[in-house]
Image: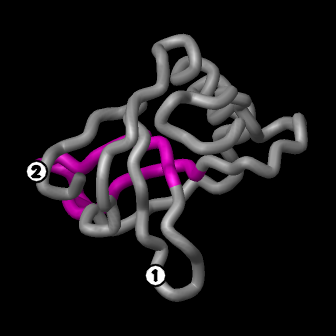
Amino acid sequence: MASIEPSAGEIGIVDFGTTAKQRPVVVLAFPQPQDARALVVVVVPLTSQIRGLRGEVDIGKPKWLTKHSAVNIQGLASIDHNSLKRKLGRLPPSQFEAVKEALRDLLNL
């Protein structure tokens, strides 16, 4: 996935190194050449441990995931673009809008 430019709303696999396993994430922002941090990708992880609380967006079980999942908004992270390993799919526009709304709510924007 790092060899192509993913766009916001795409789901990819990220290697978080030895402290965590590879896990799916939603890409929120991919660096552009004019960006101050041109190697940083902003992502939020997916989780199958759904609590149904603020900070989660339930996405069901897309065909490219093995379990019913939610976007963990509180896991907002910046990662090196080389950590993106491969593309799994894309959130439907309505679900990506729900992710953006949850981010605005969490960050009080």
Which mark sits nearer the N-terminus, 1 or 2? 1
- The residue that appears at 42% across and 70% down in the rendered structure is 15
Q: Which residue does the numbered mark 1 point to in the structure image? A: 17
Under circle 2, the secondary element is: loop
Q: What color scheme is it?
A: one colour
Secondary-structure class at tag 1: helix
Please say if 42 is above or below 107.
Answer: below
> Which residue occupies 65% across, 28% down?
59
**Residue at left 61%, top 47%?**
46
Residue position for label 2: 33
Q: Nearer the viewer, mark 1 or mark 2?
A: 1
**On the rendered structure, is 24 left or right of 13?**
right
Q: Give the residue furthest to the bottom.
A: 18
Residue 42 on the magenta span: yes
Neighbour class for label 2 at 10 Å: few (<14), some, many (≥20)?
few
Amino acid type at image mark 1? Gly
Q: Position of residue 98 (x, y in %)?
A: 63, 21
Question: Which segment is the magenta one?
Answer: 24-45
Residue 94 quadrant: top right
Figure check: 7 above or below 17: above
The answer to which image quadrant residue 36 occupies is bottom left
Depth order, front residue of 27/89? 89
Looking at the rendering, in which quadrant would you find the C terminus?
A: top right
